[in-house]
Amino acid sequence: MQIIHPAWKQQQQRRRLPAPKLFASLLVFLSVLLYVSTLSAIFRHGSQVATDKFSVQHWQLNGQDHNPTDDESVARFVAQKWNLTTPHSIDLLLRQFTRSYDYDASTDFLVFHHIAKTGGTSISDILESVFGEAVMPGSARSNSFSEKEFHAAILERTKNQTDTIGSFPEYKVSYGHTRLRPIHGPNKTNLALFFENYNALLVKPKRLRSLAMIREPTDLRASAHAMAMCALNGKVNTFNYWREKRNQTRVCTKEEGLDVQKLVEDYHDKVLRTKCNKTATEKLDRFEKKICTKGPASMAYCLSPSHLLSSPAYDGMRSVYKSLMCRYFAQQPFMTNYISIEKFMRRSIGKFDVTRVEEYALVDLGGLDLVSYAGYDMERFLTRSNRGNTANQTSLEPDFLWFGITERMTESTCLLFHALNIKPIAVPRARVVNCSPTSWWTQKHRDEIKRREPGDYAVWRAANAILDVRIESMQRDIREKLRNERLSVEDRERLDAFQEAGCLEFGYGQ
């Protein structure tokens, strides 16, 4: 007896279907196939859109839409946006696209130079969260680096141990107001000498790398004036506190009813009445002591931005970025003992040349080349054909692995996490004030700072241009890696976190 398999029997029955039924079945099959194919395409497109959501940016310049599609167009757009004057700006910005992110936690030591009032306290907090016990003792989130605290911490750790410093938990970062550069030459800093001695004790010496923050030059001076020099924010907050007690709204500008000059004059009168000749000198704070010993006129620069700009006290605010790179142009030796870069350039080369300042900032702050403490050969760097080689091989200074800009904190921190190859974390906001220190500064004051400080503004414009290109480069890098189907779970989670943190949501035309 022949055994017939049921499946074979069904197959034979299907073969005997009449032609109309066969045609109808074929039509249904093709419809289903088309439907599945369409859905698949939609899902693929949706996935691509999710990944490439910000692949094509649209920017506006002078009221016109732009859509750069290649590196050179991006660099040209950015150079024009930030009014860069050097003819090398496009070439130097292009090199940011091929600049490598070569941070190595096992060999590099990060030194964050926190220029006061640039928002660096938030960056210090991020570094503390990321590195934890690997933060070097003596680091200060809003003060100078303390060697004394470092040595005290080391003594405490070795009190009951026989360990040498080389066996300690590996320190990877420090932060504070203290500048590191230069680490060579006659103007070597005390912090550089400290790290020289520290490195000599390690089994494997570390490569020092710089982190920094900068801020819009007028905003930086306004903040320093309001907080460090005159404590105006406290007076404004007290004034607004009592307004709210009377059910009145807070005010921050002269137009709203805030008279900063009167607040300062009232404070001076109060100190003269209640403190001077009635309180022991050692119990007076630094402002009260100055008023009592030198009179209110010694702090007249606190009355208003106009008083500051006409006061000798402003001389201490000239060229505030002289401690950032420790020079403004290539031929200048590393130094900070001058009042104004504008005067220095006129004396040394006969004129102030904004293009030289832009070029040097694009190279040094941009991390495009290693530089020496002596005069840097900018022409050799700009013209050499083999751009992969370092132009200067002796007395090399720590390079800038990363810098951020206060007004662009979200973008800056995204770039920091990307440079360190770590998952983004929540960004703390430190010392956010109710009234911005620039609230009582007018456009006339801002224009005057721009007129006086072309060097600082050249550095700031170049820094913003670098940041724009780095954002585009970072977003491309993240999107490209997210397309990799073989990406590890850990790497995908890290890169997805950049998307969740909004690091792909801004374009440099904004």
Image: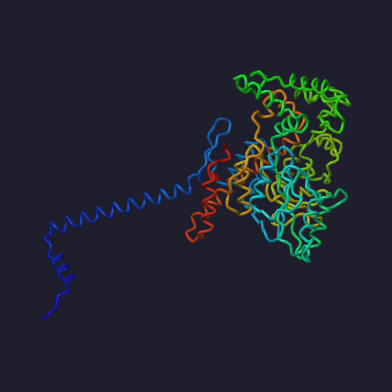
User: In the rendered picture of this protein, how many numbered marks are placed on residues?
Assistant: 0
Q: Quadrant of the C terminus?
A: top right
In this rendering, position of residue 441 left or right of residue 29:
right
Q: Nearer the viewer, residue 81 or 224?
A: 224
Tell me residue 323's x, y (percent). Answer: 78, 42
Q: Nearer the viewer, residue 70 or 218?
A: 218
Where 361 falls versus 105 (above or below)?
Answer: above
Tell me residue 419's x, y (percent). Answer: 63, 52
- Hey, which residue is sitting farthest bottom in the picture? 1
Where 222 falls versus 474 (above or below)?
Answer: above
Tell me residue 56's x, y (percent). Answer: 50, 43
- Give the colour scheme of this rendering: rainbow
Tell me residue 442's x, y (percent). Answer: 69, 23
Q: Which residue is pictured at 37% across the width and 49% down the height?
A: 42
In this rendering, position of residue 241 left or right of residue 334:
left
Q: Which residue is pictured at 68% across the width and 48% down the height?
A: 402
In this rendering, position of residue 503 left or right of residue 295:
left
In this rendering, position of residue 463 left or right of residue 77:
right
**Residue 359 visible, this angle:** no
**Residue 195 visible, this angle:** yes
Q: Nearer the viewer, residue 212 or 121?
A: 121
Q: Quadrant of the N terminus?
A: bottom left
